[in-house]
Amino acid sequence: MSRYALQQRSLPNDHSSSVQSNNRTNLSQYAQACVLKGFKPRRELVGTIDSITFYPLKSARGIEVDAIECLMSGLKVKDSELYDRHWVVVDTTNKNQFVTGRDEATITTVQPSFHGNKLHLDAKDMETLVIPKIAKSSKVIEAKFKLEYVKGVDCGDKAADWFCKFFGRPGFRLLFFGKKIEHRRLIDQTDDRWFVTAKPTDQLAYQNYTAFNLIAKESLHDLNRKLPEGTEKCTMDFFRPNFVVTGCGAFQEVSPCDYRTQFQDTWKDIFIGNSTFYNLKPRNACLLVIVDPVTGKVREDKEPMTTLRTYRLVVPDFKDAPAFGVMLVAEKLGTVHVGDKVYATKQTT
């Protein structure tokens, strides 16, 4: 049975509004038509992978690579133990809360690098931290991310001391999403706000909603053209995508409309190399985008958030958070290379 039929089966029966009901009806009819007529939606060439970036430490800088493996829990460097967003700093003075760039803006200046199978962290006026191999006796610590409790393996006192010195106060620990930790689920499967309903097999580590995210390069160009004259232009580092696609129009990955009532032209299933993903939801830009990743300081002009709010408030549930890019979930695992063609089926009404 195709996933289109499975999606219909997994949808909640109780809808909070007639708009949602109509929305789901359209999606269900589309799914039924595909199954009954014995065909799948046509794949269209939508672009090319321009860059691939993985971010070992949550909220720190990324590492660009030419190729990357795709696991259910995110990106992985081939023949290594280096993963995307599998390390996180927590604040023990604040109930082991995750430390992100919204809390400590300077973490965005920490530069990871890998040497063989070892992860190094560098920052201004700091000695290089070589992340030690996790010992079997290492403690598993429960941390908190928003309203969710997530576990991690403690990386030891040396790493903790490094971050305490970097932030200028005590209480920080570095955690690793190791093999001792069960993968946590995606957003609540009863949540019917998005394009499809997440499945119980969908996984992620310390990412926010899904293990992968994608942005069209032309979307960034469009934003930079709209910034006020004299404003410093933004790079993709402000938005921290895993995959950047070129060759498509701005915001083609998600149609610039009310997704509750119109799915027209939004990318649905996405095929890159020998990997397949599905588009779970638009990506909501948070306040981290106003932190300059070079200086580690909040921009006084609050850009690019100010400009994005003038034309990208297209998802009602995001309230004042603009939509920029999409959140993806892996369905078929494989390897993605820079230069790979990107194909997609498109959601239609």
Image (cartoon, helix red, strand yellow):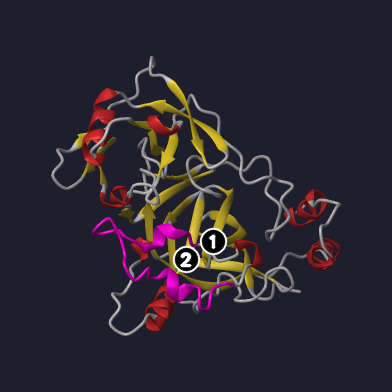
Badge 2 or badge 1: first in the primary sequence = 2
State the mark number for residue 314.
Answer: none
Q: Residue furthest bottom?
A: 229
Asked if 307 appears above or below 21 in the picture, the reply is: below
Q: Is residue 197 visible?
A: yes
Q: Is residue 147 left or right of residue 116?
A: right
Q: Quadrant of residue 141?
A: top left
Q: Classify the position of the C terminus by image quarter.
A: bottom right
Cα gap from disc 2 to disc 1, whole angstroms: 9 Å
Asked if 104 appears above or below 97 in the picture, the reply is: below
Q: Is residue 289 magenta?
A: yes
Q: Quadrant of residue 121?
A: top left
Q: Nearer the viewer, residue 27 or 148?
A: 148
Quick check: marks 2 and 1 in contact, CB under 8 Å? yes
Q: Is residue 152 left or right of residue 32?
A: left
Q: Which residue is mark 1?
A: 283
Q: Is residue 222 magenta?
A: no
Q: Quadrant of residue 270?
A: bottom right
Secondary element type, mark 1: strand
Q: Residue at x 50, y 49 (%)?
A: 334
Q: Which residue is mark 2?
A: 215
Region rendered in magenta: 285-313
Q: Nearer the viewer, residue 97 or 15?
A: 97
Secondary element type, mark 2: strand
Q: At which x and y percent is residue 314?
A: 60, 72
Q: Residue at x 41, y 82 (%)?
A: 226
Q: Residues within 10 Å of mark 2 (few under 14, many from 20)?
A: many
Number of numbered discs overlaid on the protein picture: 2
Closer to viewer: mark 2 or mark 1: 1
Three-letter residue code for mark 1? Arg
